[in-house]
Image (cartoon, rainbow, N blue to C red):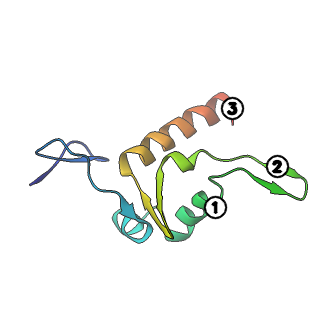
Amino acid sequence: MITSKDETTQVTDEGDPAPPLTIREFSSKYPAWSEAAIRNLIYHSRPRKVYRGRHKANGFNEVIVRLGYRVLINEEKFFQWLKNKQLNDVRGEL
């Protein structure tokens, strides 16, 4: 049986974390995050070269699990990443 620990994380009775979600499942569960928005975060999750130098990563790589072509999202890490991103933006850090 799955019980809700809090609003962002579900933990089973055995203490196992909730399984990661696909992009479609995540955006269905949290409608504020569209599939396109999540895919954009994934695209910018790794540093890459652009014609004007290098583009910094957004740190989203810590939230996702890549299995071949499949990308899964860890809910708990997503909301931790979001909270850290908000704190860094308030402080003026990137």
Pointer 1 with pointer 3, Cβ within 8 A = no
Numbered disc 1: secondary structure: helix
What label does residue 93 carry, if any?
3
Mark 2 and mark 3: Cα distance apart in space: 18 Å
* Amino acid at the residue labelled 3: Glu
**Crowdedness of circle 1 by 10 Å Cα count: few (<14), some, many (20+)?**
some
Numbered disc 2: secondary structure: strand
25 horizontally vs 78: left or right: left
Mark 1 and mark 2: Cα distance apart in space: 14 Å
28 horizontally vs 39: left or right: left
Give the residue displayed 71% in from the left and 50% down from the top.
Answer: 47
Pointer 2 with pointer 3, Cβ within 8 A = no
Quarter of the image with the C terminus in it: top right
Give the residue displayed 61% in from the left and 63% down from the top.
Answer: 40
Where does the image place residue 70, in percent across and percent down from the top left? Answer: 46, 68
Mark 1 and mark 3: Cα distance apart in space: 21 Å
80 horizontally vs 41: left or right: left
What label does residue 54 carry, if any?
2
Q: Earlier in the sequence, mark 2 or mark 3?
A: 2
Residue 77 is drawn in which quadrant?
top left
29 horizontally vs 84: left or right: left
**Crowdedness of circle 2 by 10 Å Cα count: few (<14), some, many (20+)?**
few
Q: Earlier in the sequence, mark 1 or mark 2?
A: 1
Residue matched to label 1: 43
Where does the image place residue 2, in percent across and percent down from the top left? Answer: 14, 53
Q: Nearer the viewer, mark 1 or mark 3?
A: 1
Q: Earlier in the sequence, mark 1 or mark 3?
A: 1
Q: Nearer the viewer, mark 2 or mark 3?
A: 2
